[in-house]
Image (tube, rainbow, N blue to C red):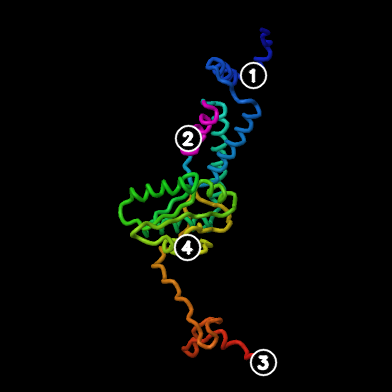
Amino acid sequence: MTSLPKYYFQDIPAYLMEEIITGMINGKMGPTPEEMEELRTSLRALVDLDCAAGVYHEAEILEAIEEAIETELGEPSQALLDELTTRALDALEARARDEANWVARTVNDRIDSAFADLDARGIVAAQALGFTVQEGAWLIDRQCGERAGEVRGSVFYHRQDLERGVAGEGLLLAFTGYAGAAEPAAIGREIVYVLQHHGVPVAWNGKVQSRIEIPPFTWQKRRVTKAPPGAGPAGPIPPPAPPPRACPHCGGRGWVTLDPMRGSELCACKLRPPAP
């Protein structure tokens, strides 16, 4: 067998040489340079998301980096850990400087206030829970089961929703009501009402199979600063408006409305000019 020239090994950093030797001893094949660069790119994106999200503590981010490296490589890599740790700490420091300039309430501040309000009303609210709707639903059901006091429903968004939110694509909220407490549709209406009370724009078609949508906004969730005061807790949800009654003149093709000047009801057909 032909041995490699000595200068070959001199060109390899000591830390990498140690990892190569360890891998050879253990009979493991390390990733190719292309695979390693792909892994670096993936882990950098993970770090950037975690730092921009505003939902994780520094210790959680650093622990996640270490776990991700070991999961992907099958073993620790101190060099990669040092590189990504430095990247995370720099990103968190830069984020904190940006956050100091957020003098007005952000959309995320309003979402935080709405979620705290909902939680106090017996609708358990969680952010960045699980990786999918199914996992998030299982986790929030477990949280509801451990909660003292009445739990009428729940609402959350998961990790993939978080990723889209940080990218400025808005949020989708999953929700449900619990048997014997409230119908899911009623919980959905209450969530929309509380979000709107706190100034969060929302869209929902009223169907329990559809998630509540917060349209695209600039993601600014605080980690280190305190949000300015906002609206207080929302009051009782108003009852839904009664359906319009049919007009005896047009058979219900128009709509009935109250004329505040005359104290009577008028239909749109009465407001139209008479047909020739």
Q: Amino acid at mark 1?
A: Ile
Residue range (magenta): 59-74
Locate residue 215, reporting x and y percent: 57, 58
Say which element carries label 3: loop
Q: Which residue is mark 2?
A: 63
User: Label 4 near label 3: C-beta < 8 Å?
Assistant: no
Given residues 176 and 15, the one toward you in this image is 176
Question: Mark 2 or mark 1, which is nearer the start of the sequence?
Answer: 1
Question: Mark 4 or mark 2, which is nearer the start of the sequence?
Answer: 2
User: Label 2 near label 1: C-beta < 8 Å?
Assistant: no
Q: Which residue is mark 4?
A: 192
Given residues 166 and 258, the one toward you in this image is 258
Residue mark closest to the camera, 1 vs 4: 4
Given residues 222 and 258, the one toward you in this image is 258
Q: Which residue is mark 1?
A: 12
Say which element carries label 2: helix
Secondary structure, magenta segment, majority class = helix
> Is residue 271 placed above or below 80 in the rendered structure?
below
| Cα–Cα gap, marks 2 and 4 | 36 Å
Say which element carries label 1: loop
User: Label 3 near label 1: C-beta < 8 Å?
Assistant: no
Locate residue 139, reporting x and y percent: 41, 46
